[in-house]
Image (tube, coloured by chain):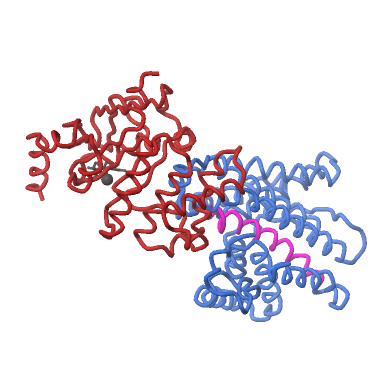
Amino acid sequence: MTRSHAVQAVLLIAALALPAWAGPYWVHVGAIAWYYALLASSWALLAGYAGQFSFAHVAFAALGGYASALLSLHFGIPPGIGVVAGIVLAMVAGALIGWLVLRLTGPYLALFTLALSEIFRLMLVAEQQLTRGSLGLQVPGWFGGESDRPYYYFGLSLLVAALLLMAGLLRTRVGLFLRAIRDDEGAARAAGVNTTLYKILVFVVTSGLAGLAGTYYGPFVGILTPSMVILPEMGLVIAMAVIGGIESLPGAAVGAVIVYGLSELTREYGQWRFVLLGLALILVQRFAQNGIFAVLERPLLRPPAVEAERGRG
Amino acid sequence: MDEAEFFAADGLSKHFGGIIAVDGLSISLSRGELVGLIGPNGSGKTTTINMVAGALRPDEGTIRLRGVTMTGSPAHVFARGGVARTFQVPRLFRRMTVLENLIVPALSNPAARRAEAERRAGEVLSFLRLEHLTRSLARALSGGQQKLLELGRALMLRPSLLLLDEPFAGVHPQLLAQIMEHIGSLNAGGHTIIVVDHNIDAIRSLVRRTVVMAQGRKIADGPSEDVLRDPAVIRAYTGARDAH
Ligand SMILES: Nc1ncnc2c1ncn2[C@@H]1O[C@H](COP(=O)(O)OP(=O)(O)O)[C@@H](O)[C@H]1O
Ligand SMILES: [Mg+2]
């Protein structure tokens, strides 16, 4: 077991134990944090590994959430099937967008995905008949009772499953190809990598996981609104991934939990929380470019030459 | 298969807006040949390499390798078909290790296994005398080492045609001799190679046949010594110098 695995095991045990000693408020906060952790870690795969700096990630969460809720509400489809349908729809939309942005990089990709995301948000607002617009769509819960614990543990399981799935994918040659595409797409092609295939694949996988996050979020919070897709939400997800470590999927998840937890702790400061978030971003960029998770898991005795080994799993 | 037909580019042309970068260029190579492609800056050498490697689709013309028409295929299909190239300015996977840079092309073959790819990478690294850098990040390498690693990455494709775009540009004289030696021994080992340079002096000892380009056209093609004496070639070079 490496030090990195040990850190992850300790964090997982802490997460499993939290409801035993923390009050219901923190269980609620934790259950929402899993939503952000799913988004931040899958976005880290898309942007940190594959270099696809998409701003449409939260739109896929909304797509998955709305689709599964609407299927249940209008067609009486059981929630389980609705969830699968929401994820599949997000994956199909991910493939489409992955294909649309094949020739776009950097700021062009960011702007294009931001525009798509904004169009989708406006559609959610405008389609009042279907989505109830800005009023928000009421979503029935999955679990009865008052406690948030079932959601807490369900969300945590989804997060762990997603992290394992992504880590498994990255251990295959796909992980290598995605990083090659990020570093130099033309050189990856010259090295025989079918970059079209892998770029679309990474959009499909990460969009599906964002869709999964949305299908979990709706029944837990009880309402879906178009404000899930606003730019500050996307900015929050990006900040979480960058603070935690954009090239480490568990790092991005930890970043999401820390940032969301801190934003709850500092709720009384209102808008000033975003100033704090900005400061945290600047500090991380200055002092811990691989994110705070890399600082946590960096072995004390490891020589700097092995820096090369980072940026995996 | 006719040996002269190992590789054939026929009537390649490429425009960029109003600029005609390559204008009706034809080259054919037989198996195991080592050819120099020279010409003043801007004469279309890199554009030619880009078309032959599948990175740019020619406006006109065809490319055949071992009798198979490759024109219009994406670059990774060219690579998998045995066309490997280096870039004028090295384009490595900078945030990946030297070893990872090498196994990407090997693993782009779906049948390849990682252990075998790593073993081959070890061989290539020892051929290039870079073993001590196996686990370094590519971006930590010196300019010359990056050129060598890029050559290694091309070799990992087990290419039947190797395209080297200015392998000596900006290289330390000591390393220049080493790269010359590598190219010579690769050719002796049976590789078919096109070496691009803007200056024939650097490669005249290396290549027996030289193709000269000027303003997108082929203006000479033959034994290096003859080509060097060709008045059209001399004019192209002095003309290019006067223009500066
Ligand atoms: N991508 C491009 N867009 C526009 N013009 C280009 C592009 N690539 C090359 N050119 C132009 O085509 C001509 C040939 O360039 P190039 O093939 O790079 O020449 P060389 O490698 O012989 O120096 C030059 O005039 C160059 O400016
Ligand atoms: Mg050039």
Highlighted magenta segment, given as a residue range? A27-54
Percent of width and height locating residue B37: 25, 38
Q: Is residue A86 visible?
A: yes
Q: Dividing the picture into quarters, in which one does residue A2 lie?
A: bottom right
Q: Is residue A96 left or right of residue B2?
A: right
- Quarter holding the N terminus of chain B is top left
- Find ligand 2 in the image and state its quadrant: top left
Residue depicted at 65% across the width and 53% down the height:
A171
- The one nearer the camera, A111 or B95, is B95
Q: Dividing the picture into quarters, in which one does residue A300 lie?
A: bottom right
Percent of width and height locating residue A172: 64, 49
Q: Is residue B226 left or right of residue A41?
A: left
Dominant secondary-structure state across the stretch colored magenta: helix
Residue depicted at 86% across the width and 78% down the height:
A21
Percent of width and height locating residue B30: 33, 27
From this viewpoint, which residue is outermost toward the right? A145
From this viewpoint, which residue is outermost toward the top? B1
Q: Is residue A66 left or right of residue B230?
A: right
- The answer to if A81 sits in the magenta stretch is no
- The one nearer the camera, B156 or A23, is B156
Q: Dividing the picture into quarters, in which one does residue B189 lie?
A: top left
Residue depicted at 71% across the width and 44% down the height:
A129
- The answer to if A46 sits in the magenta stretch is yes
Q: Is residue A6 above or below residue A98?
A: below
Please identify which colour was used for chain B in the image.
red
Percent of width and height locating residue B220: 17, 31
Q: Is residue B18 visible?
A: no
Please identify which colour was used for chain A in the image.
blue
- The one nearer the camera, B207 or A200, is B207
